[in-house]
């Protein structure tokens, strides 16, 4: 289309060699994915780590990566369900930000021929964003969140001829055998002193506000008494959901034994 000649370039066979040339000649990496369909955004990460400032929708990696003063962002929230209308709004916002904020910053050159503010944006981007998106940070997360914990649990379960593993298995079998026999024999009507569990949400959008665990306060034979004093600090139409599920400190996480009953 003639109106785009000289303004848009289509680059075929995008690879590392071409990316190196492209990034070295770019000041702003403009990426405008349709919310929330951005798969990742690795090209923006690559650009950012080489001193290029990002200007993108807060989706994919930029949702986590954006830092004020180290790039620019369009909000992650949609204004219109109609995509054509949303595209028009995003385009207007992009042009407005370029005209009033980004381009003036770029051309605010000093006597040495460069913009100190623009350079500061680049420094902020490299120092405040890059460390959170390196392979080292990812590997550190794998070790701290998974590998070390799994190794520790492996040793725990293996010790003393699988003693702990056998105890967990026996506990699970006991819960399964008697699960249907467990019943709530009394439930307070006073919402300030619920004795099972609290889930609070609004009627309009079913937004979860809080989940409050109950505290075991006493036991009498086979009866266990739980309590939770809870005070609402916001107004509106609310609903409460009460549930019970087995707890054992030796379980690695809730889904390891996913029995639950809503009451």
Image (spheres, rainbow, N blue to C red):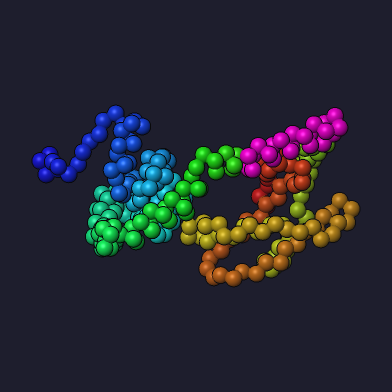
Residue 232 in view here: yes
Q: Is residue 232 above or below residue 176?
A: below
Q: Is residue 123 above or below residue 228?
A: above
**Going 71% across and 50% down the picture, which residue do you hit?**
244
Q: Residue drawn at (70%, 57%), measured in percent from left and top?
A: 213
Q: Indicate whether residue 147 is drawn in magenta.
A: yes
Total count of labels = 0
Figure quadrant of the N terminus: top left
Q: Residue 14: percent from the left, percent from the top?
A: 31, 32
Quarter-of-image position of residue 193: bottom right
Q: Residue at x 34, y 60 (%)?
A: 116
Range covered by the magenta-colored residues: 143-164
Q: Is residue 101 above or below residue 181?
A: below
Tell me residue 169's x, y (percent): 79, 34
Predominant SS of the magenta segment: helix
Residue 183 image point, x, y percent: 76, 49
| Quarter holding residue 174 | top right
231 displayed left or right of 221 = left
Tell me if I can see residue 82 in this picture: no
In which image quadrant can residue 94 be found?
bottom left
Q: Residue at x 69, y 40 (%)?
A: 149
Q: Is residue 171 left or right of residue 253?
A: right
Location of residue 230 in the rendering, given as x and y in whole percent from the top left corner: 67, 66
The stretch drawn in magenta includes residue 66: no
């Amino acid at each position: 289309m003639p109106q785009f000649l000289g303004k848009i370039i289509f680059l075929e066979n995008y690879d590392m060699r071409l990316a190196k040339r492209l990034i070295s000649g770019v000041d702003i990496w403009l990426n405008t994915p349709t919310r929330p369909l951005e798969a990742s955004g690795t090209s923006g990460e690559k650009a950012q780590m080489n001193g290029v400032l990002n200007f993108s929708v807060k989706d994919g990696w930029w949702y986590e990566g954006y830092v004020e003063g180290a790039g620019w962002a369009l909000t992650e929230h949609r204004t219109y369900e109609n995509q054509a209308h949303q595209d028009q709004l995003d385009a207007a916002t992009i042009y407005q930000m370029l005209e009033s904020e980004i381009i003036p910053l770029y051309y605010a050159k000093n006597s040495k021929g460069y913009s100190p503010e623009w350079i500061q944006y680049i420094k902020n981007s490299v120092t405040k964003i890059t460390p959170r998106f390196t392979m080292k940070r990812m590997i550190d997360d794998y070790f701290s969140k998974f590998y070390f914990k799994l190794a520790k649990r492996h040793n725990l379960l293996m010790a003393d001829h699988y003693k702990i593993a056998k105890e967990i298995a026996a506990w699970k079998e006991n819960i399964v055998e008697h699960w249907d026999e467990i019943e709530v024999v009394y439930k307070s009507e006073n919402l300030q002193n619920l004795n099972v569990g609290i889930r609070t949400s609004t009627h309009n959008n079913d937004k979860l506000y809080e989940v409050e665990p109950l505290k075991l306060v006493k036991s009498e034979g086979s009866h266990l008494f739980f309590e939770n004093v809870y005070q609402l600090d916001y107004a509106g139409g609310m609903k409460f959901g009460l549930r019970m599920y087995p707890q054992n400190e030796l379980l690695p996480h809730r889904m390891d034994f996913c029995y639950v009953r809503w009451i």
